[in-house]
Amino acid sequence: MRIHKLIEKKSASIPNKSVLKEGLKTVEFLTDEINLSRSILIKDFVETYLKSLRSKSKQSLPADNKKLINRKKKEYQKRENEGSELIVTTPGSFIGKTNKGITVKLKGTVINRKPTNALKHITITGQGVTISSNAIQYCVNQKIVIDFFDKQSKHYASLLSPISMDGLLWKQQSMLSLENKAVLGKRIILGKLKNQKNLIKYYHKYHKDSADVLKEKYIEVILRLDECIQRVKNFEVTDEQYAPVFMGQEAVGAVAYWDYIRLLIMDDEVNFVARIHQGATDIVNSMLNYGYAILYARVWDAVLLHKLNPSISVLHAPQTGKPTFVYDLVELFRAQAVDRVVISLIQKGEPLKMAGNLLCEPTKKLLIQNILERLNRYEKYRGEELRFIDIINKQILEVAAFISGESKTFKPYIAKW
């Protein structure tokens, strides 16, 4: 009957069975015979209504449950991550250890307290910050890394446990064959180029209807990056000159990539002209350089943790006292860990300012907070949900396995878009 079909179709909009019954009482059926059996028909219609509700409930329950579980999971992950990082920027701060955890005091007053079971990393960026030997001993025992940065955003030291120096792979790393050096270098550069390409694709999703000039630039840059990727893939390694070839293609890709970013943020009043690595005084380059310094420190920590030598590189030329292998590996993560964060802050219209030639303190704090949030955000990685910082650690572990000979190849991290 058509009434049954109508009730099934409209069941979600009927508040309850009482409302349905009252409505059906006003319906006049076509024959006296049917009107006499009205109560039986109404009962039958109500049963149709209830069955329809149960059916729709079963269909929607898995989706509703999944949404609820995902929401709860994100809330839990956020609470977990809030306790995992401690950032100290205020001059005169004192970092100590109590039975309640690691505390930060300023002029004798506790301004921050982190439970010991949650803390994973301490970042000190302020001058005149002191830390007690008890706090240092506790962090070393619990494998909590402490990174130090100067006011120019240079990472100048890390505190790690001496256990990090056990079972080194330095000999295997220094004796790595030309073929394996080239394989590792190739995979790193391919990973960087693909991550830059995917970040551009990510932004293009939200700017498809933008000005023609940006759409034209998108096509141009994607084609250029694809060309670089193919040249790196197809290059036949015969001698040590593989590194200049790979780095040359990386440089070509970088010019195209930053040209697209320049157009992307042109209307955001930040006056970004080009990428400047050292001595930058504009807001965009200063934020990028500061963000990269934080990323360098995390990759450096992971390199030491997995028994690798930070100075035996496969792409960058060796430099005395420079962690050139860290420079190699950090290329994989720049776009997703730092570029994406900086662009997001700019496009959100955050109050980003300079103090002379340096980032002002509020901008610096905002940037650090967002970089660390990104590092602690979960994403899918080979079937697992991992924090981005854990993906970095897994990648370095996989590099170590390749260098030691435990693994035949190395597969770089490629971000989804």
Image (spheres, rainbow, N blue to C red):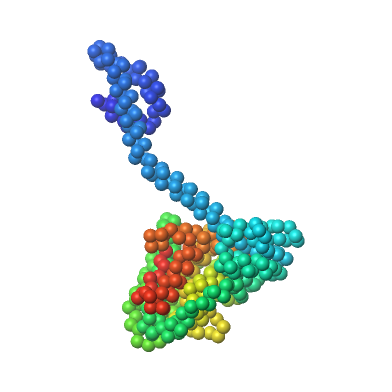
Q: Position of residue 101 (x, y in %)?
A: 64, 59
Would residue 307 appear left or right of 367 to someone viewing this image? Answer: left
Q: Visible in this render: residue 211?
A: no
Q: Position of residue 232 (x, y in %)?
A: 37, 77
Residue at 41%, 78% (x, y): give it: 404
Would residue 165 appear left or right of 246 to someone viewing this image? Answer: right
User: Where, quadrant-wise, is the C terminus in this rendering?
Assistant: bottom left
Q: Quick check: 68 above or below 361?
A: above
Residue at 31%, 24% (x, y): give it: 45
* Residue 244 placement: quadrant: bottom left
* Residue 63 placement: quadrant: top left
Residue at 62%, 63% (x, y): give it: 87
Q: Position of residue 65 (x, y in %)?
A: 41, 44
Q: Position of residue 11 (x, y in %)?
A: 35, 30
Q: Quick check: 366 above or below 408?
A: above
User: Where, quadrant-wise, is the N terminus in this rendering?
Assistant: top left
Would residue 19 appear left or right of 323 to someone viewing this image? Answer: left
Q: Quick check: 346 above or below 332?
A: above
Q: Nearer the viewer, residue 115 or 107?
A: 115
Figure disc tally: 0
User: In the displayed image of the protein, which residue is found farthest to the right?
Assistant: 107
Residue at 41%, 57% (x, y): give it: 205
